[in-house]
Image (cartoon, helix red, strand yellow):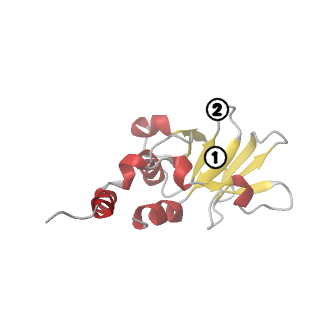
Amino acid sequence: MLKPANAYVRDFIANVNPLSVLTAWNIMRDQRDLPKTDDGWVWLDRRKTTRFKLDANGLVEAAERDGQPIVWVSCDDVETMPEDAPPVFWAKPGTTVKTVMLAMHKSNTAPVAIFDDSSRFIGAVGIRDVLQAVLRR
């Protein structure tokens, strides 16, 4: 017996691995929606562990995690990063969710900052964002 066409589409979607099709852009929280402090810092995560201070052009002036200055590196380097000093990672909107998750793991669950092609901060992906995207299916 043939199924209706929408049943085939529903089955296909239910069986697609979201890690292979979703990107950082699909699940990020826009920087306009992130909490801000009175002195110009933007929190990247709901736990308020990681924050950036942005200039008027949206470029990062300073970055902190747990009150300490941090090094932030591209998700492109996530496979080669040493384990001893976890950084905070950044990504482009087209970075896969799989890579974002690996970066969070390597950085002990720090959020991943998202930057546009002009190096302006545009948003962040935290643990909850990834979980909501994966569990939404």
Eye-nearest disc, 1 or 2: 2
Task: Judge by depth and name the residue closer to the eye, 133 or 68.
Answer: 133
Percent coordinates x, y for residue 137 in the rendering: 39, 65
Q: Secondary structure at mark 2?
A: loop
Instruction: Evaluate if marks 1 and 2 touch, with contact meaning CB atoms under 8 Å apart.
Output: no
Q: Residue furthest top?
A: 118
Q: Residue furthest left?
A: 1
**Residue that label 2 marks:** 117
What is the quadrant of residue 79 in the picture? Answer: top left
Q: Earlier in the sequence, mark 1 or mark 2?
A: 1
Percent coordinates x, y for residue 73 in the rendering: 56, 38
Percent coordinates x, y for residue 13 in the rendering: 34, 58
Task: Judge by depth and name the residue closer to the eye, 98 or 111.
Answer: 98
Number of the label disc, if any, that sits on residue 70: 1
Q: Is residue 7 above or below residue 74?
A: below
Left or right: 52 with respect to 15?
right
Task: Judge by depth and name the residue closer to the eye, 1 or 88.
Answer: 1
The residue drawn where x is 49% and y is 51% is 107
Q: Mark 2: few, some, or many residues within 10 Å (few <14, many ≥20)?
A: few
Q: Which corner quadrant holds the N terminus? A: bottom left
Q: Of the residues shown, which amino acid type is indicated by label 1?
A: Ile
Left or right: 82 with respect to 91?
left
Left or right: 43 with respect to 20?
right
The residue drawn where x is 53% and y is 52% is 26
Q: Of the residues shown, which amino acid type is indicated by label 2?
A: Asp
Q: CA distance from mark 1 to mark 2?
A: 22 Å
The residue drawn where x is 75% and y is 39% is 59
The residue drawn where x is 68% and y is 52% is 64
Task: Judge by depth and name the residue closer to the eye, 68 or 51.
Answer: 51
Q: Mark 1: few, some, or many residues within 10 Å (few <14, many ≥20)?
A: some
Q: Secondary structure at mark 1?
A: loop
Percent coordinates x, y for residue 66 in the rendering: 64, 59
